[in-house]
Amino acid sequence: MTISDSKSEKRIPTLPASARMRADRQLLGAVGTDKTVLFLDIETTGLSRYYDELTLVGYLAGGRYRVHIQGDDPQPLLDALASADTVVTFNGTLFDLPFLLQTFEDAVIPATHIDLRYAVRRVGLSGGQKALEQLLGFNIRNGLEDIDGAEAVLLWHRYLRGDLEALKLLVRYNLADVQGLCLLLDYVIDQVEHRDFWIDVPRFSQASQPHLQIESLADIVWPLPHPNRTRSSFREVFGERPAARSTIVGIDLTGSEFKPSGFCVLEGAHATTSLIGPDDEMVETILAIRPDLVSIDSPLCLPRGRLHVGDDDPGRNEFGIMRDSERMLKRRGINVYPCLLPSMQRLTGRGILLADRLRRLGIPVIESYPGAAQDIMGIPRKGAGVGWLQQGLAEFGIEGDFVENIPSHDELDAITSALVGTFLLDGQFEALGGEGESGLVVPDLKAPETPLVIGLSGRIASGKTTAARWIETCGFSYTRFSLVIDEEIRTRALPLDRPTRQLVGLELHEQRGQAWLCEQALRRAGDGDRIVVDGLRWPEDRAFFVERFGKRFVHLHLRAPFDMRLERSGAATPGARRAFEAADAQPVEAMIDALEQFASHVIDNNSSLEQFELHVSRVVESAVVGTK
């Protein structure tokens, strides 16, 4: 029900008289003269309890308003909460109190909570607090009319940058909210049908008198920004680790090739931005850059069970339009559009095709959501103004022409997307999503360290299994793609030989995809913190492991002359040689040589076993040291 004038006012369904009497008794009993009533309102950096933080708490009890500002000693606030009989909020059930309990583990919430968002329904009203104040003629926001929740967030950001007047304005805004609570509660009490049972209920709206505002604000000792109120920087977050030296492409993708997309090349902390249109131009540019990773602001997979983006998909009704990753973000308080909303379908389709095209070329691709990343990093979103987003990125330590010449918001979002790629490569990330969906990557400074994974590629008999088994002796869990393929062969009761493995492996590649095969091979390695994977064959394999493990994935490619490989395979007869040549020429082996260009290390296995193991040991040592 929405706010309306008194002539057309709607009321909630009427309770039976006995139920109304009980409800009124509970309300009036909670605010009787012998009760300590605390009015409370909080300010935060956003709506997500998962990612945002509490900035200040305004609270009023006994006619005096106090404020707790982030970084202050919380004990006065905690004492006030503990000594109150009743706490009054507006939407505190869903917002203020959960934020308080998350921020202050020792907080004791009063046993009685009057949430005015719901209490006003007792008198036939509903709507937001400011709308109710306006409807009822409460004049408490002189000079604050243009400030809302979004502007309050920006006031805090201004304060963090040294603007003390912004903090004072934020506190005035909070005080008005608290005064509004007093007036609303008085109105509700005056309107209940059985107030005559409690004739001595106090008038809380005296808190709205001007002298209270002046005296309360004058009592505040205004702080200046100090170190625990500042944000982290690029160098503080990534240090001198490999991710800080990476080259990442960030793309703020549009739904049409005819509308340019924001494009950023992030080399370390230096960003170069532009606008790029067609996919062919985008792919050509990316291949020329040869980045470590591409991060795209676009959905890159469908909801589990869906076959295509259109509403004529036979699974539309059963599987819906939203992925698990989007549901997770919504539960965390981050607003995100379902990937198959009609207005999103073209973007989702384009993103999926572009990512698949790049992965087939060996380029790792992740899905990012700049808005969520900006919330996590404490950077105002572009909705607050392009200048705020530009300033936030510059303060984080990103350099480039955008600092002096503010580009389009699409280019700034592309910078943020690229930054998400840096978080992934450094292992400071979380991949949101369910089984059967590729992950939506968000920064996570507290993420557990991902396993160290060494993947081996090379042609038949180049020494992959020998190297992998040697690496296994160094404390690595061993897995290989053929374990997955062999299980499929057994299911079909086919012979376990090389031709069958190649045939079934190619079939699985084409029908289920390399991401599925990689996932299945990883599962067979268990939960170890060091894994060696034998048998990478496709550029998509390399892309998958970088997307999953970032710089903790090390790619080792092995080379050996044909005659040496032939000898090692035991192909001594002409027939055996022809069989070896045929196996070496199968389509499933066709992309192995292309993997060499992506490898972290290349070993020529053309000497003794002892020398080969020495080279492999050096790679392992380098991997263990170099990924820290």
Image: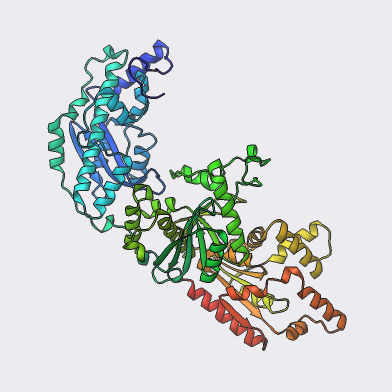
Q: Is residue 90 above or below residue 332?
A: above
The answer to whether residue 266 is seen in the rendering is yes
The image quarter in which residue 406 lies: bottom left
- State the residue at coordinates (77%, 80%): 569
The image quarter in which residue 231 lies: bottom left
Q: How is the image coloured?
A: rainbow
Q: List x then y, in percent, for residue 318.
A: 64, 38
Q: Residue furthest front?
A: 258
The answer to whether residue 446 is seen in the rendering is no
For this rendering, which residue is in front, 550 or 221? 550
Q: List x then y, in percent, for residue 306.
A: 64, 45
Location of the N terminus (image quadrant): top left
For this rendering, which residue is in front, 561 or 206? 561
Q: How many numbered discs, if any?
A: 0
Along the horizontal axis of the image, is 134 left or right of 573? Answer: left
For this rendering, which residue is in front, 130 or 347? 347
Q: Is residue 225 above or below residue 288?
A: above
Q: List x then y, in percent, for residue 221.
A: 15, 47
Q: List x then y, in percent, for residue 267.
A: 43, 69
Q: Is residue 194 above or below residue 543?
A: above
Along the horizontal axis of the image, is 370 left or right of 561? Answer: left
Q: Is residue 301 above or below residue 450?
A: above
The image quarter in which residue 16 lies: top left
Along the horizontal axis of the image, is 273 left or right of 24? Answer: right
- State the residue at coordinates (72%, 56%): 511
